[in-house]
């Protein structure tokens, strides 16, 4: 099933809490927001255009709220409208359908019934030509710090051929603005605090633009400003940006907190960055296990080695066997040029367009965007060709690598 986004309406929030708790256990479902006010709910559905909107109604006094259902069906035809109630009567079900609801959900929730509703919602949503096609969301993540995630995220965003937004989700120590040479006026906190009125005009006035194709939504300027952010609000912002930009790149911290997991859930692709040393390989293995428990499909994960050096004599085929993943890229180690680009506040792919680092990042960007057929090298050239001729200097047995320190 494809990823589905939901928003709920409930005047007393009791039913919405039950729905939130139930949907929270389903990996492909993401809750964008909760409302107890009809006008705000109408505005949010029009602004966010979720896959589905769930309205929890009083089955004994629902006439006025069904007017809201009817209005929603007129202004947001791509959103599946679902009414829900405790003790649904046949009259309530019939009136809901006549008002424009596609599904009626009985509360308390019956798991089998909910799955049926979700499957039908997914089928409908796939068949509808939405007014705004969602852009691709790419998360750049590592299981440990110090492997160059922010460098890769900023350069990957700069290498994209589409209109791209880089979002810095390192809430306490985010530094993507300095990588792009930007002095931002607004940050992610400002977006979240104003998310209920964000439209194209306001978004345009609040983003920081690095080039005609690259924009930035920076992390909070002060650590305490992160207190205003939670998983649901950040998810809502990411979803909204994916409606405006063809590509959204997320620069993530190396933690599995609720906010980071919500961002990973939203991603179409995860670029898992690793270093070719024992701590880096171990951290990558742990991250892959977490991704498996979260239910992420294997095609969503792409492992990249950063700071690769020809002098490193690790057998890459053994690394792949140990991780049970193919490596999609080896970003060369060029310390001098990388540091120069960071100090200049300009992505290396812009500052050094002919460098080997730039060539590999552009190749990875094309591959993640589904254009790998236009860029060589093939797998044999990537692994055997660049590695097979090197004389081993050091080695360790990956298949016996311990899982923890």
Image (spheres, helix red, strand yellow):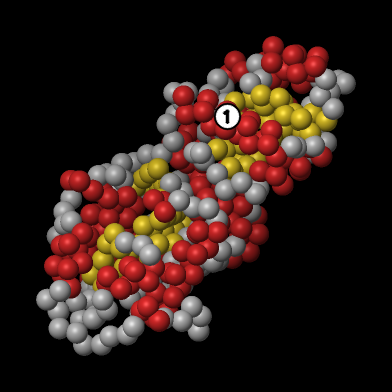
How crowded pointer 1 is (Cα within 10 Å; few <14, some 14-19, many 20+) is rated as: many
Q: Which residue lies most toward the left here? A: 389
State the residue at coordinates (51%, 80%): 404
User: Quick one: 111 or 335, which is closer to the camera?
Assistant: 111
Answer with the quarter of the image where residue 108 lies.
Answer: top right
Indicate whether 101 appears above or below 404.
above
Q: Is residue 320 left or right of residue 187?
A: left
Q: Position of residue 136 (x, y in %)?
A: 40, 43
Q: Is 220 placed left or right of 145 in the picture? A: right
Question: What percent of the width, then of the height, locates residue 181?
Answer: 35, 60
Give the structural element (helix, strand or loop) at label 1: helix
Which residue does the numbered mark 1 point to in the structure image? 121
Give x and y (percent) for residue 37.
75, 31
Q: Is residue 315 visible?
A: yes
Number of numbered discs overlaid on the protein picture: 1
52 left or right of 212 in image = right
Query: Could you say which quadrant of the image residue 139 lies in?
Result: bottom left
Residue at 27 percent of width and 79 percent of height = 314
126 or 398: nearer the viewer: 398
- Please name the residue shown 45% across and 40% down the image: 242
Q: Is residue 85 above or below residue 144?
A: above
The residue shown at (76%, 43%) is 17
Q: Answer above or below: position of 279 versus 199.
A: below
- Quadrant location of residue 72? top right
């Amino acid at each position: 099933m494809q990823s589905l986004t939901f928003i709920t309406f409930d005047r007393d929030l009791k039913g919405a809490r039950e729905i939130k708790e139930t949907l929270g256990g389903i990996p492909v479902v993401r809750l964008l927001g909760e409302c107890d006010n009809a006008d705000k709910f109408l505005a949010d559905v029009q602004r966010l255009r979720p896959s589905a909107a769930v309205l929890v109604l009083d089955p004994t006094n629902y006439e006025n709220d069904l007017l809201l259902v009817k209005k929603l069906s007129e202004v947001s035809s791509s959103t599946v409208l679902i009414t829900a109630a405790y003790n649904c009567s046949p009259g309530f079900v019939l009136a809901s359908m006549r008002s424009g609801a596609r599904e009626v959900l009985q509360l308390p929730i019956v798991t089998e019934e909910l799955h049926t509703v979700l499957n039908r919602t997914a089928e409908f949503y796939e068949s509808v030509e939405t007014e705004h096609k969602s852009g691709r969301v790419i998360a750049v993540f590592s299981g440990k710090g110090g492997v160059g995630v922010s460098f890769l995220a900023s350069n990957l965003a700069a290498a994209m051929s589409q209109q791209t937004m880089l979002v810095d989700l390192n809430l306490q120590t985010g530094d993507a603005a300095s990588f792009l040479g930007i002095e931002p006026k607004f940050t992610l906190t400002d977006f979240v605090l104003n998310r209920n009125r964000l439209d194209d005009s306001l978004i345009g006035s609040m983003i920081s633009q690095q080039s005609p194709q690259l924009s930035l939504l920076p992390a909070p300027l002060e650590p305490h400003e992160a207190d205003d952010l939670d998983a649901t609000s950040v998810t809502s912002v990411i979803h909204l940006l994916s409606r405006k930009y063809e590509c959204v790149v997320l620069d993530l911290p190396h933690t599995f907190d609720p906010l980071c997991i919500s961002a990973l859930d939203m991603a179409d692709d995860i670029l898992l960055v690793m270093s070719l040393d024992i701590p880096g390989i171990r951290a990558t293995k742990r991250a892959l296990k977490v991704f498996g428990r979260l239910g992420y499909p294997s095609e969503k994960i792409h492992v990249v080695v950063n700071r690769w050096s020809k002098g490193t004599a690790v057998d890459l085929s053994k690394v792949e066997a140990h991780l049970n993943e193919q490596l999609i890229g080896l970003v060369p180690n060029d310390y001098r040029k990388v540091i120069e680009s960071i100090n200049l506040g300009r992505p290396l792919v812009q500052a050094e367009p002919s460098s080997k680092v730039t060539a590999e990042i552009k190749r990875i960007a094309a591959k993640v965007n589904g254009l790998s057929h236009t860029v060589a090298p093939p797998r044999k050239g990537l692994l055997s060709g660049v590695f097979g001729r090197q004389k081993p200097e050091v080695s360790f047995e990956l298949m016996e690598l311990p899982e923890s320190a």
